[in-house]
Amino acid sequence: MMKIIKRTSRALALIVVYIMCAYGYLSAKGFIIKDGIPILNNTAQADTEFSEKVRGDVLLSSTQMRIEGKENAPLTMYAFSSMACSHCSDFHNYILPKIRRDFIETGKLKYIYIHFPIDAVSMRVAKLSYCLPPEKYEGFISALYKKKDWFYSGKKETLNKYAKEFGMSDEDIKKCDEDKKLTSDILMTFNHALKTFNIEGTPSFIIQGKDGEELIKGSRSYDDLSDYLNKRLSGEK
């Protein structure tokens, strides 16, 4: 019976990864998933309120729990991002450094990057990043957000080159690619976020504090995010 369950789980995981391939090009161009249909979202910003109340816990395995900032920070930001998403790249390269300076390094915010891969290539990046030692995790992600040759080349060797620059051997890469438990963990996080928080596209952010959780959909300016975070910190929201 256990063998049948394991085989079924593996088959389902492969099917999901296969479906993700269809969204690869679309996610890079700023598409979101709505009712199973890719929709162009040029601004990567929802036409709704800046944030909305949500309830529930973010589901992460210990391997996926890569934290920046102080453990006891009053606010936690969970950033759901796809490595193939251009808006996620812009956030990581231009907005996150300011958030680090003003909120993470000052002890006001704990930041957790969460892979939300909607294509097979960004799923592979997610796995490789988690297979690296924690101290190399953020550097690997930042390096790949600065360059997209690994995505557009369509060759595994291009991505392997970056993994090797961060210390992985061919054997390490092969072992990571074949890690079905890690694939399952990432997919569980993905599906849980879809069902619990209605996260449909990237980037999306869950901001958690003593006053509850709120969801921000889409890319926002630093000034808007800064104003929002300061209001949450002061209790004005």
Image (tube, rainbow, N blue to C red):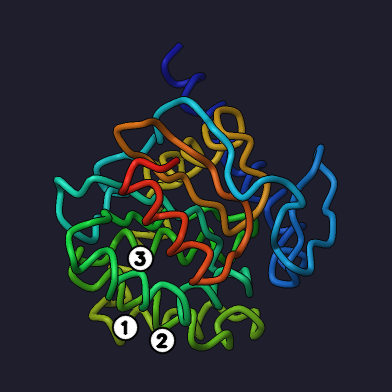
What type is the residue that disc 1 sits on?
Lys
Q: Can residue 11 be seen in this view?
A: no
Relative to 99, 49 lies left or right: right
Relative to 69, 217 lies left or right: right
Instruction: Report the residue marked by disc 3.
Output: 129
Instruction: Write down the quadrant of residue 138 in the picture.
Output: bottom left
User: In front: 42, or 39?
Assistant: 42
Q: Marks 1/2: CA distance? A: 5 Å
Q: Residue furthest top?
A: 1
What type is the residue that disc 2 sits on?
Lys
Q: Where is residue 154 in the image (x, y as percent from the top left)?
A: 65, 79
| Element under disc 1 | helix
* Residue at image location 58% in from the left, 38% down from the top: 52
Crowd rating for badge 2 (residues with CA inside 10 Å; few <14, some 14–19, many 20+): some
* Residue at image location 41% in from the left, 86% down from the top: 161
User: In front: 125, or 58?
Assistant: 58
* Residue at image location 17% in from the left, 59% down from the top: 107
Instruction: Report the residue marked by disc 1.
Output: 164
Instruction: Report the residue marked by disc 2.
Output: 161
Q: Marks 1/3: CA distance? A: 12 Å
Relative to 80, 86 lies left or right: right
| Element under disc 3 | helix
